[in-house]
Amino acid sequence: MSIVEFKKVTKRFGQVTILNEVDLSIEPGEKVVLIGPSGSGKSTLLRCINALEEINGGDLVVDGISVKAGGRMVRLIRQEAGMVFQQFNLFPQMTALENVAFGPRRVRGESRQNAQKLALEMLAKVGLADRAHHYPSELSGGQQQRVAIARALAVKPKLMLFDEPTSALDPELRHEVLRVMQALAEEGMTMIVVTHEMAFARKVGTRLIFMEGGKIAVDGEPRELLANPQNPRLKEFLQHVV
Amino acid sequence: MDFEWSVIWQALPELLKGARLTVLIALAGLAGGLVIGFAAGLARAYGNAVLNAIAFAYVELIRGTPIIVQVMFIYFALPILANVRIYPLAAAIMAIIVNAGAYIAEIVRGSFLSVHKGLREAGLALGLPLWKVLLYIIGPLAFRRMIPALGNQFIVSLKDTSLFIVIGVGELTRQGQEIMAANFRAVEIWSAVAMFYLIMTGALTLILRMTEKRMRIL
């Protein structure tokens, strides 16, 4: 069974159609890389999956639950689909450890002790065990984003959504985030990544989707598509980003 | 003229009694005002259309009328409308609750909405219901930003208690007025009354300053 299934999903902001009857199935274990020009709907598509954006038409089923089921059901979807944001969005009043322990404690209802133990494991996994007691303002952008990944993982999601996770980072800080993402992919995590990192798409992606004008224009194997793009718009886009 | 210190010494017990009542009205009124203010402010910021409209009407009604009219209404008009007896002290506390609540509602709304929207999304994306996101993430951040504005409102409300002279509550200003009516020592008595208010607002300012210092504004 697909873990994410878009069925003619339409999303509008006022008069503007951002997603136009999108059909898309994603299977467990896939590493989908979403690319496209700005305004093409790739971030919106991602944000519809965990219902941060409400869809206006069609249906979208995540791990067997429709995003239109509302309330409790939407919260279940969000627990299964961890999200990492472009701007990290760490809770500034909490240390790295508290940020990561927050989900297990308040969402999964773990005891404080278990939540902290799990949080330390997750921080170790992203290479930041030694920064556990630092506040976000005391961490570099790359470290903040790794904490954000650990925070999402601590809720034990079945899939991970990445919304331009490296776009706000200096070039020399990107690789540390990408390395963590690659390690996660190697563990078998299902991942959907909006990014402009073509090297990551080539190395880690199992599927590349090029969006244009609210539709999926190209959908295929990353290495093939990047080496030999048939679609003229994709070809043009790749010339600009690489 | 001579400034007679003995007048003040003689008036001190009465003035202290008045000051105690002033503090009591202010504390009870502000405690209630905080509850109402948080409820109305959150309803304005996050409530559905109905809650939002109710809170909006309340805030506009109170902010749009003088507090003295509100006191008069509660003490003289409400008993007729609702056929209940209202004691002066109860009317005074009620007036502060209702009045401060409206201003605090705007302070609460503003500071909650000033917290970066991404933090709310991050909380929701973890699978939390909105109320938990507000309680654990947005609330603590908003609270820090509220403190200066809340301090202002506390001081205003404390001084507003002097208006209750009109309904015969024996608070500080009323006590001063009564002593003055007996001995005609206006300079000494009103100087002393002013000092009492300064001491009370000064203490409040100090407490707020310390609270602010203990919290990092984020």
Image (cartoon, helix red, strand yellow):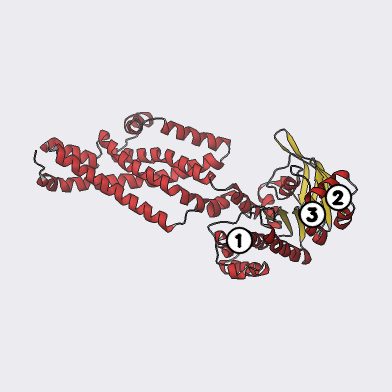
Q: Quadrant of residue A152?
A: bottom right
The local secondary structure at tag 1 comes to loop
Residue A88 visible somewhere in the drawing: yes
Q: Which chain does tag 3 point to?
A: A
Q: Quadrant of the N terminus of chain A?
A: bottom right
Residue A7 visible somewhere in the drawing: no
Q: From the viewer's perspective, is the residue at label 1 or at label 2 nearer?
A: 1
The local secondary structure at tag 2 comes to strand
Q: Nearer the viewer, residue A156 or B156?
A: B156
Q: Which chain does tag 1 point to?
A: A
Relative to B182, does residue A224 appear above or below in the rendering?
A: below
- Rounded to the nearest whole Å, what is the CA distance between mark 2 and mark 3? 10 Å
Q: Which amino acid, by three-letter code, is at mark 2?
A: Asp
Residue A181 pos. (x, y %)? 73, 62
- Rounded to the nearest whole Å, what is the CA distance between mark 1 and mark 2? 35 Å
Residue B86 pos. (x, y %)? 32, 36
Residue B152 pos. (x, y %)? 38, 44
- Rounded to the nearest whole Å, what is the CA distance between mark 3 and mark 1? 25 Å
* Residue occupying the point 10% across, 38% down: B183
* Whether marks 2 and 3 lie on the same chain: yes
Q: Which mark is residue A219?
A: 2
Left or right: residue A218 compared with residue A107 = right
**Which residue is labeled 1 in the image?**
A140
The mark total stands at 3
Q: Which amino acid, by three-letter code, is at mark 1?
A: Ser
Label 3 crowd (10 A; few <14 / some 14-19 / many >=20): many
Q: Earlier in the sequence, mark 2 or mark 3?
A: 3
Relative to A16, does residue A61 appear above or below in the rendering?
A: below
**Which residue is labeled 3 in the image?**
A33
